[in-house]
Amino acid sequence: MKAKTPALVLGFLAVVGVGYGGWRAFGEYQLRNLTMDPIKPGHVNIVAVNPGSGFGIIVSNQVAQLAEFSDSDLDSPEMNEDDVITKKKLLIREFLGALQGNGESLGKLVMSLNDVNEGEFPAQAEIWTKDQIERALKGDANLKPKLERALSMTLDGQPLPTLDLDRLIDGIIIEIPFQMEYNVGGTVTKVDAIYRESFNSQFATRAGRRLTEKFLTDAAMQATYNEEIKRTRGELTDKDGNPLPAQKENLATSLASRFSETRLKELTAKPYRVLENAFVVVNDEMITGASKSTYEGNNNQLVTDIRLNLTEEGRLRLWKFSREHPRFQLLFMVNSVALAAPRIGTELAEKSVTIRGVGAEQLAADAVDDINRLTSTRTTQPSESK
């Protein structure tokens, strides 16, 4: 009997091989004629993020963060936050809007990925467009002095003699127009957007920091301001009487540089990588219903899963994408709320897909209710338009 064992093993492996080969052949037959056309996101989305982008998504407490990982971690089945290089909050609503070609959303997404938070802008700061600034730089009789007053400095780098504390601290808000070209719902589209940032002169930043770090009388504030004017002009000396170098800034050059093509490429580099490596695999038109289940997981913690029922088109799209991309990250979102972002390493060929560990049970229940409400009110078959 022992002598027959190798034959039995080989026979078993042959059966397994035929079964696996048959499965591959069946998959090839079903997916051969399926075209993975890009689609726009909807209210419910399964978005694939290619790990080759260098980025991954971490979801915690319904907050999605875009993380830049080291190369060693990109192909691992699970994300290790110890390998995170940088981590930024991903604005899901703006992310989806950008995928739909919405310029306002794109502008806010690019700002967030460059660590710009509009909520931190000075409330009273003047807003200046590129056109207004360029006209001021060319010497417009009205705009040039107005811009200099807003920045407490002449365009050639001379501080204004009179202290205006509010303007000194606030600076201005610059609106920078830009354009990105990427795939929107199957069409390569040029999307125009506005990038906003706070700007101030080096002199105003330096003087403002000194004037606000402790309480000063009006006279002391003016004296400190005058000292910073002298520092800018190179009129101060060190303790040994040696002249300190001037800290003068060519304000016109600093302003013009904000709009340079080189800078725009830098600002849009990461957003391009994110948008070009994100693919909407399934939207709500390809989902027929949802359910949830809650159970006790590790450390006696309750875990809630969501099960999505897919249309045939949704099933085939998810199957084909998972088949052609052995490792990717699946971002599951409902009404612009990120619920989970598991890494996928197997083919997803079933007519239902289970999203595991979506967070709080009530959040999962609300998401399931939203999905079922959406699918139950659909009066027509899923649209064929993309």
Image (cartoon, grey):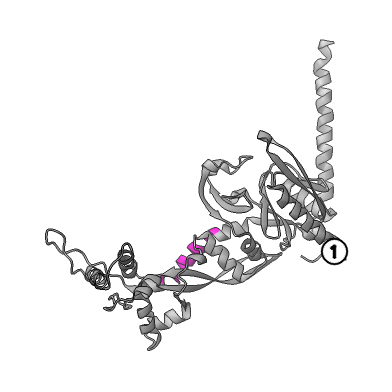
Dot 1: few (<14), some (14–19), or many (≥20) neighbours within 10 Å? few
The N terminus appears in which quarter of the rendering?
top right
Please say whether residue 252 is visible from this viewpoint: no
Residue 24 drawn at (x, y percent) = 80, 41
Which SS does the magenta portion mostly show? Answer: helix
Q: In which quarter of the image is residue 17?
A: top right
x, y percent for residue 3: 82, 11
Q: Is residue 188 left or right of residue 220?
A: right
Look at the image and give the residue range highlighted in magenta.
257-270
Q: Per the image, is 62 magenta?
A: no
Per the image, the residue denoted by label 1 is 377
Q: Closest to the observer: 277 or 369?
A: 369
The image quadrant of residue 246 is bottom left
Say which residue appears at 79% left-offset and 66% top-offset: 385
- Residue lying farthest left? 241
Q: Is residue 238 above or below residue 251?
A: above
The total of numbered circles placed on residues is 1
